[in-house]
Amino acid sequence: MGVVNVSVAGCKIELFEPASCEAYATEAPPWMKGIIKTYGGNPYQWLVDAAKQARRDGVIKGILLHQGESNTGDRSWPGKVKGVYAGLLTDLDLKAEDVPLIAGEVVNADQQGACASMNSIIGDLPKTIPTAHVISSAGCPAKPDRLHFTPA
């Protein structure tokens, strides 16, 4: 199994929306701008290009999403994710029924997750994206910052 990893710590989903990426990146804090720069200034396009390259040797079987802390409380987040997912399907010539979206919850309330309230919004993804599945974070130990999981 291969994984195409595109990670920008602390970003909102808007960084992966082609229409808002540039504006978001311009306003990002300096430390985040450095991460964005490693993806040629456009993490979404980097993801598409890397997935196309990976597909030369394999088959894309799913899209894994772990994001949401920076969008905590944003009820429009599932719709934004739907737009990014739809864009990936189009740009990679994939069908939703063949490539589900697998979304992981953020640190759970049972671990005093700082953004645990976002899990109810993440849980709504299957209502917006029929091929989405949500993976519970219940019981996953958190680091002291209550934002990140421990390696365990």
Image (cartoon, rainbow, N blue to C red):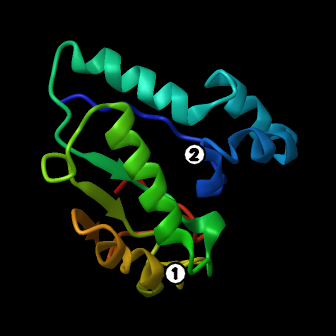
Query: What's the distance in space between the residues labelled 2 and 1, CA to CA?
Result: 22 Å
Quick check: 22 above or below 128? above
Q: Which circle marks residue 16 in the picture?
A: 2
- Which quadrant holds the C terminus? bottom left
Is any part of residue 119 visible from this angle?
Answer: yes
Q: What residue sits 51% from the left and 81% below the top?
A: 116
Percent across and percent down for residue 45 are 53, 29
Q: Which residue is drawn at 62% across and 81% down?
A: 73
Within 10 Å of disc 1 (Cα), the crowding (few <14, some 14-19, many 20+) is many
Q: In the image, is 101 to the left or to the right of 86? A: left
> What secondary structure is marked by label 2?
helix
Residue 17 % position (x, y): 59, 48
Above or below, comparing residue 17 to residue 120 in the picture: above
Helix, strand or loop status at disc 1: loop
Question: Would you place residue 88 above or below residue 152 in this image?
Answer: above
Q: Along the horizontal axis of the image, is 125 left or right of 19? A: left
Camera-side residue: 125 or 119?
125
Q: Which residue is drawn at 64% across and 54% down?
A: 14
- Give percent across and percent down for residue 98: 13, 46
Q: Which mark is residue 103?
A: none
On the question of residue 138 being in view, the answer is no
Q: Position of residue 56 (x, y in %)?
A: 22, 13
Q: Which of 71 and 95 is in front in this view?
A: 95
Give the mark nearest the N terminus, 2 or 1.
2
Q: In which quarter of the image is the N terminus?
A: top left
**What residue sits right under mark 1 in the picture?**
116
x 18%, y 14%: residue: 57
Point out the frontmost of discs 2 and 1.
2
Pick whichever, 146 or 131, lies toward us: 131
What is the three-letter code of the residue carrying label 1?
Answer: Ala
Disc 2 marks a residue whose amino acid type is: Phe
